Image (tube, rainbow, N blue to C red):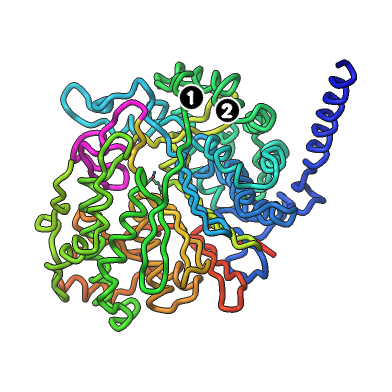
Amino acid sequence: MKAKISVVSFLLLCTFLISQAQVKSIVGANKPINPYQYQIVKTDTFQKASVVSAHPLASLVGAQIMKMGGNAFDAAIATQFALAVVYPAAGNIGGGGFLLGRKKNGELVGIDFRETAPGKAYKDMYVDSNGKAQTSLSQNGHLAAGVPGTVAGAFATLPYAKLSMAQLIQPAIDLAENGFVITQKEVGGLNSHQKSFKQYNTTAIAFIKNTPWKVGDTLVQKDLAATLKRIRDVGQKGFYEGKTAELIVAEMQRGKGIISLEDLKNYQAKKRTPLMFNYKNHQIIGFPPPSSGGILLLQMMKMIENKNIAALGFQTAASVQLMVEAERRAYADRAQHMGDPDFWKVPVQQMINDTYLAERMNDFTPGKASTSIAVKAGNIKESEQTTHLSVMDAQGNMVSVTTTLNGGYGSKTVVGGAGFLLNNEMDDFSIKAGVPNMFGAVGGDANAIQPNKRMLSSMCPVVVLKNKKPYVVIGTPGGTTIPTSVYQGLVNMIDFGLTPDEAINKPKFHHQWMPDEVYVEKTYPQEIRKQLQAMGYKIVERNSIGRTEVIQITKDGKLNAAADRRGDDSAAGF
Ligand code: DON
């Protein structure tokens, strides 16, 4: 018996030592990834595997993990943790998101790690005694935070990966512990948020600095490194229980937040069945509710499928008008019918029905704007900060992950002593019927606040097959503009034959039913704007729309990767 125990202990010790030995650091001055010297790569072609994400260091981490024998799921986990360190505006462990994957054997994977409303949340929690909606509370500070889902999402992804969590999280730990040099864009983000960071924090945090941040500064996040180590050493409970959970609840108590130990302990990522549809000879796979992204994309693409948009031409008033009218009709359904399917019966089958979608376009008149007063949600009788990463590996696995804190730097509140920002995702609920959220989206009962409910999202991670073979991985941040950005990216590639780089970087437009306006990026051609105005559209110029990351497989099997030029987004691979 004694001998048996000592053999078992010896084997356990060996396993422990082997796993420790495997966790060699890949990040450092003389390591494969140098956090003090790196470059942004906007587009490249790789032979085997690629990651495109919002930050070069995170993309390099994902690619290196695949070089070390990991698959696309490993890369997605490691990239996501790295983003939580190097891209604090949106990368996170204090937020949530959706992972959509397709394994090389064709199996589809949908992991929902969307935040939930805390147990003490209630429908009118942001409505004051005069009946006025207090968006300042749903958008900033402690009360804006939903129960974070990202860490549970990583552990729900782990069974599809090949390496250990210790290996996948170590690059993020090294980046947090020893720091990395920040880019011009990060300098801008950190400097412009100093006032909010001071206003919404109760402890000293790594992002606050007495003199302005400048390019070349090193951002070190010791508290975050300690939290990541607890996740490495204790697993999911290293975040949802024990010291990290206690730090979250202590932070809540200092700032009148309501997330409890019980909320954290009970949080669960959920498996969802992805939504698949055909568009011409492509199979497009999107995320179902609680994201509106997959349904919106399906509706918009199906509404234009039989209209020969290629003949109308890329970036012509006629093709933009057709796409805008499909957007209007799809977003009207979003406002009325979509919410967390575990709390609200979302009429998915009716909304994606071919006859229903054809009828929705019956009143479309080429050359004349419809109005959002006339176009209501379909009559169905039943009751700016997020980030995306796209991965393909050498075996043919495809992974598309969109994750969010909601606004830039989320609630602006860092959990004292734990070093990570909390989301402000509660604002994605309809906090009062008809009151627009920070993206102008309106909603009603389907998306009203209830304890433990997931707030409706627009995130739209997508993988695409062409003639049933892996073809494209795509996704983007951008609030309500997410599904329309993905829609434009796909139509640009499939119908207009643009390269991935062109497809995502050409100026974009967006309509979301309410308000009844067509948003265009600053660089959108004036001539098209004028022609649309003549048709009756109100054109509103706005800041950049989305930051799309795409990987497309070429005819000869290479990976054509393109990172959005609107940010620090960068491609890596081999
Ligand atoms: O889930 C959603 O729809 C939003 N929280 C996404 C926010 C976002 O994309 C902000 N990025 N620019």
- Residue 158 falls in image quadrant: top right
Residues under numbered marks 1 and 2 in contact, where contact means CB atoms less than 8 Å apart: yes
Q: Which amino acid lies under the numbered mark 1 shown in the image of this protein?
A: Leu
State the residue at coordinates (87%, 25%).
Answer: 7
- Residue 8 falls in image quadrant: top right
State the residue at coordinates (19%, 70%).
Answer: 533
* Residue 144 is inside the magenta segment: no
Chief secondary structure of the magenta span? Answer: loop
* Depicted 37 relative to depicted 499: above or below: above
- List x then y, in percent, for residue 87: 56, 46
Left or right: 358, with 158 as reference point: left
Secondary structure found at label 2: helix
Secondary structure found at label 1: helix
- List x then y, in percent, for residue 267: 47, 28
Q: Which residue is mark 1?
A: 264
State the residue at coordinates (80%, 42%).
Answer: 22
Q: Which residue ends up furthest to the front in the rendered image? A: 1
* Depicted 198 relative to depicted 188: above or below: above
Q: Which residue ends up furthest to the bottom in the rendered image? A: 311
Left or right: 474, with 275 as reference point: right
Looking at the rendered image, the quarter that the C terminus falls into is bottom right
Instruction: Count numbered badges in the picture.
Output: 2
Q: What's the magenta region?
A: 427-452
Q: Nearer the viewer, residue 161 or 422?
A: 161
Q: Which amino acid lies under the numbered mark 2 shown in the image of this protein?
A: Phe
Using the rendered image of the protein, determine whether residue 568 is visible from the camera's viewpoint: no
State the residue at coordinates (38%, 54%).
Answer: 275
- Note whether ligand 1 is within 8 Å of mark 2: no
Looking at the rendered image, the quarter that the N terminus falls into is top right
Whole-number angstrom distance, CA of label 1 to CA of label 2: 8 Å
